[in-house]
Amino acid sequence: MIKKLYYFAVLGLLAFSVTRATAQSVPSFDKYHTNDEVQQIMKKLAGSSGTKLHTITTSPGDKPVTVLEIGANLKDVPAIFMGANFEGDNPLSTEGALYFAQMLLDSTNYTKNVKWFIMPQPNPDAAAGFFASVKYGATVNSYEINNDADDAVNEDGFDDLNGDGLITKMRVKDLQGTYILSEKDERILTRAKKDKRGIYKIYDEGLDNDGDGQYNEDGEGGINVGINFPHLFPKGKKEAGLFPGQAPEVYGIMRFIYDHPEIAMVYTLGNSGFCSVPPKGGRKGGANMESIKIPSRYAKRFGVDASKKYTMDEVIEMMKDIVPAGMEVTPSMVASFLSLGAVVNPLDADMKFYKSYSEDFKKYLEKKSFNTERLDPARAKDGSFELWAYYHLGVPSFSMNLFTVPKVKEEKKKDGDALSMDDVKKMSTEDFTALGESKIDTFLRANNAPEKMDAKRVLKMLDSGKFTPEKLVSMMKKMPKAEKEDELSEKDKALLAWSDKYWEGKGFVKWEKAEHPTLGAVEIGGFVPYLETTPKPELIDSLAKTQLPWLLQLSTKLPAISFNSEKFTELGDGVFKLEMYIENNGKLAYPIAMGQRNGQPAPIIIVLDGEMEFLQGKKRTSLGSLNGNQIKKLTWIIQAIKGQEISAKIESAVFTDVVKQIKIGG
Amino acid sequence: MKRYILFILLFAIVFAGNATDNKAKIEVPLRFDRYYSYDEVVEALQVLHAAYPEFTTLDSIGKSEEGRAIYALTINNPKTGDVLSKPGVYVDGNIHGNEIQAGEVCLYYANMLLTKYGENEKITKAVDKNAHYIVPVVNVDGRYHFFKDGNTSSSNRGLRVPRDDDHDGLFDEDGPDDLDGDGNICQMRIKDEHGNYKIDPEDKRLLVRVKPGEKGEYSILGYEGIDNDGDGKFNEDSEGYLDPNRNWGYNWMPPYIQRGAGNFPLSGTGIKAVHEFMASHPNIIIGYAFHNTGGMWLRVPAEKSTEIPRTDIAAYDIIGNEAIKITPGYVYMPAYDLYPTYGDSDSHMFFIHGAYSFVGELFMRSAQETYKVKKKGETTAPSNSREEQNRERLKFNDNVALGELYKDWKPFTHPVYGEIEIGGWVKMSSRLPHTFMLPELVHRNAAVVLLSDEQTPELTIEVFDVKEIGKNLSQVRVRIENKKGLSSMTAQAFKDKLYQRDGLKVEGGKVVAGGKLSDIRLNKVSYKENKPEVQFFAMPGNSRVEYQFLIEGKGEITFNYESQKAKNVTTSVKL
């Protein structure tokens, strides 16, 4: 069955030996690297100046988890942390992280005022699954878990029955089956509709090794590092572990990151893509910020009714009475003071930068002639690193998926030359209106718009001026698709086409008959593991080269806090009003809205030092929050000798400290 | 009351021999008319271990943030079986640094088991039946600093993980200061004709609020301290605050939701160590975490959206409903009725380690008021108002506690405020019983743990019916009974597939069919479809089940009921 093995594995081996022979110092990216090779590359990269290699923990499978620190200055500069391949099933992202590290070392442009932490392999146990002789898309580490709570551990995993090195599916004709063959493509099985009888049952390839009537219910391992983080921890899911941080990898990563308060931004390479699709909102169950009940212990203090609900503005007014004079009361402060609960949706202010950068990213890719007509990135999972970074660290968290399978171009429908959604999206209102009712109706019907939505209605909406063809398309995309009998999903279509055209059919194991010891006559086949996430290695270089520079560009959006100017007003007899203007020259706020809400990012403190008496204000003053490209004024009244110098310092655990000498009286 | 006095007398007699001074040598049996500093706790554990080496092991299970060892004393009688084979009873205390008497409860429990073994029937049974794991001090840094430094009765609770409470970029830079160097953080007050307080006419040490329009005499300045960081605030960034009992893994929430949570679950090194200790003793079936104060027995859940199975609540009730009779005035309730918490130890023990878990909130402040005299005809004395309570507490201090709980106000020259007065309740008051009351407190609470030892599962197994039903086929019926109140496995753990499910294994013959007998007389059996020779089921408290097997072949057939927490039982039959 060697034939059916990925031939890139062979290619990769060849490439590797070549690299070794020529003894290049730069790692090659024409293959996927095993754990050992990844660690060798890390060591090699750590040979450059301005680097430091940290081994932060060891996996249950006894593999190191390493982080490479890169920067011209490793002290007193803000840092960006990049982690890749948390779920272990996305080897491309590990390559991406190594590639990125190499990019940072190749140029000094992005390491002058910021340093980097690069962690290419946080889930080495699962990542090893890609190189295993039998592949199934492992996501869990080797933590011992008795998944079925019987008297044996890891006794009933998958079995490679047809010996092709791949775990695919088994389909079995069964009187109680619920699946039928799709008429569109016999390789795909679809659920039989309500009133029809199913023919097949589907299982993962394997035996009932422990004879308990279930198949593959207790395979090797473990905990999925990619969903063991504390934000929206998926309690109850075996693969997530029992509690966040139970996986030693996750515990070690969290400890490392909290030991480095200078981390001001977090990148994730993997299956989700906040760079192209902003994080999803709309989740229920979070803190309700607009209908707030005041717990009775505070209600008494505020002199309000504990049984009533109040708006955020009303509560802010109440709180103003209890905070020191002049202190700004923010919704975040209210939320944490009253324990309003978890934030589960991205905050509005943060969505603004996510949306605007995702649009910029699309333009960036178009400029590079990168085909963006691909399947959407996966949604960030509950318990994932990227969600945790945003919600718990309170820093901008950007994730990028270097690859998804290209979409199948929508064929022109038989009913006339209907326009595609993408055609319409680009049209102006005038051009679209000019198509006329009949063509618009054809377009709407061909793209499964609900019956009610006809050309007349759409034209009326466009008339209002607030509606555009682009909005129409995005609305249509969000609508539940009219369920068409036996239509293949967009994903199945794309994966089949990808397998057929790009893999010469090798992305899908053809259904072949086999005799199963307990199920009898079965057929084994289905999509090959890693098909969705992992293209041939010869694409690594171009995918990385085109997309990763965007993350370098994003790094320039970091806040940059500095003194703008100061003004003295003499109030008489050596008493001065000092007004200092502090500016944020970066595009991002510090902290972002989520960081203001959770209070996690370290504060920025303005420290005045020298011979003076503070009549109003203090030696150490918190800057509070400062939006991107904004200026904030801080005021002190001091008594000092005119002409004497004092120093002002911008001090923080995140940014480079700035010191300025200023002369009393200006 | 009579019993109470008798009790004290008894203790006085027991300890009369060596009750010379409070620096007395630490020896077995341990004394409980005193509190032990961290070093003394360690010494007490060492002398217990030295006195009973065959029954005890003493392990350092991990280190705190400041490098102090956390000790676990294991008590097990090796003659009655290996330590992991018995239902484990876990007891810890003092996870909050200031809640020191919790440590004494643990020490007392250990001391009681060891010194009364062989003399007292109940104790002998408990030592022989269970494995006992005792961690007297979880927050070792907290206990150390509570004794050593100036404190209030409520300070020094958390772990020594620096935190910037006031968000000024500095960590733990402005805690209270023991200005008069007496080891206590008391109150500061200043004479102030514009103040809101005046001297209580009934007790000159107390202040009462002035009525509107009335002239004031004093302002209260808060806890003893100075503005160490010059930000205009006093004592606003003391050590921590990381609350070790909000740092456990189950249902952990970040600090912006749960104050004191720490940055991530088990970030406290000692908390992680205790977690790992529990994980490596999977036989622990019930756990106690002692705290102060309030007089409560708390069970899970700690938060309202979490539900636990009815049968687990029933098991809890067996102990909880008796516990409140052993500790007068205590209440028994789910922890969420007090207030919701995330990342607490009792939930972690129950949901992660599969053990029934109790929090014991030791001590009630009302126990240190003088008793209100009942009027004729009244069955209970009316409760006191807050002001009255303070007066009664002071009388208790004066007349019962030898004046040791309260410091009279003394003048002090404060660097910022000038002439002030310092005084008030000392750190060893308010949440801790006076040492004369400690023996009763530790005994009653240890008695509750002893009660739960008794209720840990005791299983029996028997083959009660064998019938030949074919040439080479026998029908065998097995009965298993749990004669105690706790299940062999919590229903929650069974549901969650938390670990290998308890179950019955048949060996020695081919089991053709097997399953639970739901009606012996009508011969109703629900046969298990696959692997009938292994049947997974827990044995709830006070329960009995019968199983029926159809077995092919002849010879010796054994039936093993295996449980991770209850002691395994086995029987066999010759076919």
Image: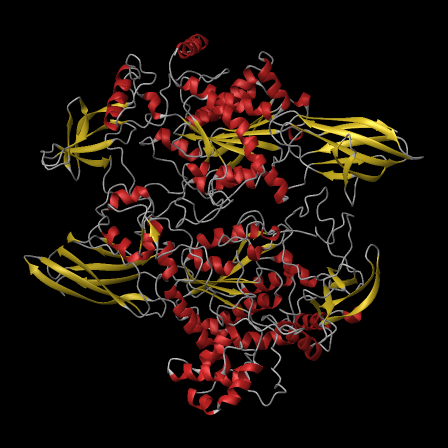
- Determine if residue A604 is in view: no
Query: Residue A403 location, x and y as percent?
Result: 58, 72
Point 65% across, 68% down: residue: A32
Query: Residue B484 location, x and y as percent?
Result: 62, 25
A277 w.r.t. B544: above or below: below
Residue nearest the observer in this picture, A203 or B74: A203
Point 77% across, 60% down: residue: A160
B408 w.r.t. B17: above or below: below
Residue nearest the observer in this picture, A557 or B539: B539
* Tag count: 0
Query: Residue B9 location, x and y as percent?
Result: 41, 8
**Toward which corner of the image does residue B233 lie, by quadrant?**
top left
**Toward which corner of the image does residue A503 lie, by quadrant?**
bottom right
Quarter that holds the C terminus of chain A: bottom left
Query: Residue A265 location, x and y as percent?
Result: 43, 63
Residue nearest the observer in this picture, B276 or A276: A276
- Determine if residue A610 is in view: yes
Q: Does residue A405 appear to the left or right of A464 in the view shown?
A: right
B158 w.r.t. A319: above or below: above
Name the residue furthest right.
B471
Quarter that holds the N terminus of chain A: bottom right
